[in-house]
Image: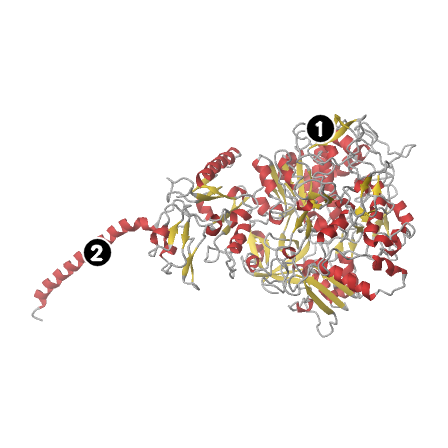
Amino acid sequence: MARTLAMFTDTSLCIGCRACQVACKQWNELPAEQPEWTGTYQNHAHFTDKTYRLVRFVEKPQADGGLQWHLMSDVCKHCAQAGCLDACPTGAIYRTEYGTVNINQDTCNGCRYCVSSCPFGVVAFNHDTGRANKCTFCNDRIHNGLGPACAKACPTESIQFGFREELVAKAQKRVAKLKEMGLKDASLYGADPNDFLGGLNAFFLLLDKPATYNLPDKPKLPQRNVFADSLLSVGSALLVGVGALLAFRERGQDKGGDGDV
Amino acid sequence: MTTNLIDIQNSDVIMATSNMAENHPVGFQWVMKAKERGAKFIHVDPRFTRTSAVADLHVPIRSGTNIAFFGGLISYAIRNNLYFRDYVVTHTNASFLIDPAFKTPTDLGGVFTGLEQTGKGGPDPHVAQTYNRSSWKYQLDGEGNAKRDPTLKDPNSVFQLLRRHYSRYTPEMVERVCGIPKEKFIEAAKLFCGTSGPDKTGSVTYALNLTQHTNGVQNIRALCMLQLLLGNVGRPGGGVVALRGHANVQGATDLAVLYQDLPGYLPMPLRDAHPDLKTYLEKETPKTSFWVNRPKFFISLLKAWYGDAATKENDFGYDWLPKRATADGYSHQHIFADMYKGKIKGFFAVGQNPAVGGPNAKLARAALAKLDWLVVKDIFLTETSEFWKAPASPPHREAADTKNTKTEVFFLPAAPAAEKDGSLTNTMRLIQWHEKAVNPPGDVTSDAEFVTSLAKRLQKLYAGSKKSRDKGFLSASFEYGDDPKEPNMELVLKEVNGYATEEIKDKDGKVVYKKDQPLNTFVHMTDDGKTAGGCWIYTGVLVEGADGKLVNKANQRKPADDKDYLAHGWGFAWPANRRILYNRAASDVNGKPYSEKKKLIWWDPNADGATPEKKGKWVGLDVPDFNAFLAPDAKGGDNAYIMRTDGKGAFFGPLADGPFPEHYEPIESPVKNLLSKQQNNPVAKIWQVADGKNELAAVGSPDYPYVITTYRLTEHHLSGVMSRYLPMLAELFESHFAEISHELAGELGINNGETVTVMTPRGKIHAKAMVTNRLKPFIINGKKTHQIGVPWHWGYNGIAKGDVTNDLSATVGDPTVYIQETKAFLCNVKKGVV
């Protein structure tokens, strides 16, 4: 396997210009959609089957009367333990030699298990083609020596592309620097493989709690609940069974009592 | 722009007065670089924008009060002794003495000496008053040189006048006028004035936020003066960062799309003041400064246009050159006011969309309906090309009367940049070449093809003309290369660059230039017709290589490296590939860098000089913006501002509305001027337009109680022709919206996403309310004052459609350049469709 590639999105450098969002659409030939009114600069409200990069705009008034406006370019995380990949029954979702996660459109059967298995709400279903879609990490570009279109278009190097271990080292330095500059809440999200999901191949530098950016604090795969849920199901089934037996027993007793009516 | 975007990374503090992250996101990477290096970033803006989101300090300011803010900073720097005294004495006119008859608004109740009523019978019915500027001048000694006081103590010195003029601009006054809390202002002042001195520099960015006001030029002057005071011009990490509105505004200005200039900032001759070449050159050529060379540039320009027909005997065709009948009269606003009057019969709109993009767009559309013919050349069917389609929305906005509209409209599809060769000159004077990627489809043509083919057809039409006025046009050559249709743009660039019209030899008889060889530098231009050049400042962009082939330096692509952080190998920056202007000012009077950390250009006494027996040369990290061999102790050796007749950066700089910027309220304002009894710029131009097409709201009008500012968004471009028609961009901001504070929305009962009506005396629009924390009411003189913000990209064509914001704005103008006041005026807001 080749060295793992990654994208590092540093929100402390993001200016919300949405060049990434447009570059993504342009390179991947994704059509525009009728936008909904989100009440902010953000369009769209969520990832869709035609929007793989999405810049989030989060206003956060401060206690001192000031304001923070968090700008963050969100994307598929290409998780090391990918819920979508685990859930896919046809093997259409696969991991590339660079560690990225892709959906093979030819073998996708449109079952949508992946949609509900993604802890980040990234995978979306295309009702026209009947298949699931998400960021491809510009699979065609990275196999031809180029970085993803979003990283290429970013004017402030908020989105960086490279080998994962090098990017993580760089990101850790950046966090230390930001803390030195007084940004105490700066932290990395998904850089550490031991943290959650085996680490994200698209990881982030955040300036606030993950929830502020619509990210789960400690994401978990829905599949991880299968074992406990199965036990619960077995338990429930047993309870129902016992209940039924008891019911039959009572009916038998009643029968005796009502026989003369 | 005095500097270079790359150099912003060297700033210790950057103050953006414009919304740079949104409107210049690519250049903004250097602000982020500076921040990574530990620089502080201040953003001064009425709104909290994407620029504020990454700023260390956001300073909210009521629109239209920039001079009060800059004046406050100037005053703060002087009072707290934070100015860079050595720089101020050496490189500015602070020590010059002014005529004692001159008085500032501090002494004259808000106006300068010399204000005169022009009255109803005056030369311009749209201007009520004008300045007699006879006292706005230096005191001269017996030899005609300006008197100076290097101690800066003389009460008539520019410095003392400056101090006195801005003594009223206290932090308390800034708070009352601008609505900036005093503590916040002092925080910003401390931070930015801290960039004064040898070891520190700061840069200030501006864009249309400062220009689109009835005191637009003075806004910029105020900012320049602050930078001079702190010693922040011509030094690394310093500068006045003028950010242009689109990709080639700088190029358009350089190549004279403005009415008052010929290419290279040569004044456009006036019919009465400049009857012949001799008079023109005498009147327009100063005795000192680099402009003493103006005749060489002017005659080379005439040679470039009229070729062999331009001879010494016929004044190089000076008589054929069109002249201005009046000094103004040709600005955008003049044109549409005159068009509405029926004075203009035909109009070309090439890459411009005045039906949406200009001030008072309703007036513009009504004016277009009065034309006989209109030619629109653009990449999509713009609103201008279909001006009669503006939808009616009673009771205020009538569609053009199509039955009586007689205008014949021609639409010519235009090729965008990727479909043609050519150059763009960006905000930092950088000329960059682009090559055609694909051929334009169908009938689509480049602008160059259109202009040359039109010219050639007209030449055919006028071929037999015996009239002397037609001779110049008929002599001009529009042939560029072998392709009869598409001009070879490198040959156009060669004409712009300049070339020898005949063989030129030096005094020893050695050939310096062969006939037709491009000139290497404008220093080689002559006033005898031996050189031609279409825009002298561009000379050097195209040269002949050792192999005799043309080298297009605009096409160079060598990025910056450790040895050349200013990237002199990337494109070509005019003039002479200088990246930072006035860079002589990076060194002191003796030519020594002010500090090792901030060195740029310095005098090396041991370097080889102009001749073998003479030593000494200006050297450094940039091309010196100075005579490279003029020693610092020679006469004029400390005159870093080489384009100015006095050689100094100007604190005292007479313009139509005064030699110092003074705060006046916008023409439409919610409050009386708190600084003086003079409400508006006394010499601003307010057009009187018939049929109520330019009505104005009174000061503090209860019908129009809110301040409105208009602006652009990253995702859309100007009037939207290059973005609203593209699905991927249209979807990002599909609906027209108005940004409204929670406080105002609360008062009016408006929820986020509801439709509101925004109205002014000129018109009304409907938009969605974007209720946000990013706008806050201002406390002006103790009273809560609301401001709203409305982007102006939408129109009735394209994919993303919406009402025309410019239907709200007025036809009023700055007295120097007649730019409109679309950044600060008054409106009312009502819930729903009214």
Q: Residue at x 59, y 44 (%)?
A: B52
A231 to the left or right of B258:
left
Which mark lies nearer to you, 2 or 1?
1
- Say which amino acid is labelled 2: Ala
Chain under callout 1: B
Q: Position of residue B535 (x, y in %)?
A: 78, 48
Q: Which residue is mark 1?
A: B593
Q: Residue at x 86, y 32 (%)?
A: B147
> Which circle marks residue B510 in the picture?
none
Q: Residue at x 80, y 43 (%)?
A: B513
Could you confirm whether marks 2 and 1 are on the same chain?
Answer: no
Q: Nearer the viewer, residue A114 or A44?
A: A114
The colour scheme of the drawn protein is secondary structure
Q: Nearer the viewer, residue A202 or B50?
A: A202
Q: Position of residue A222 (x, y in %)?
A: 34, 51
> Which circle marks residue A237 in the picture?
2
- As helix, strand or loop, the secondary structure at mark 1 comes to loop
Image-quadrant location for residue A236: bottom left
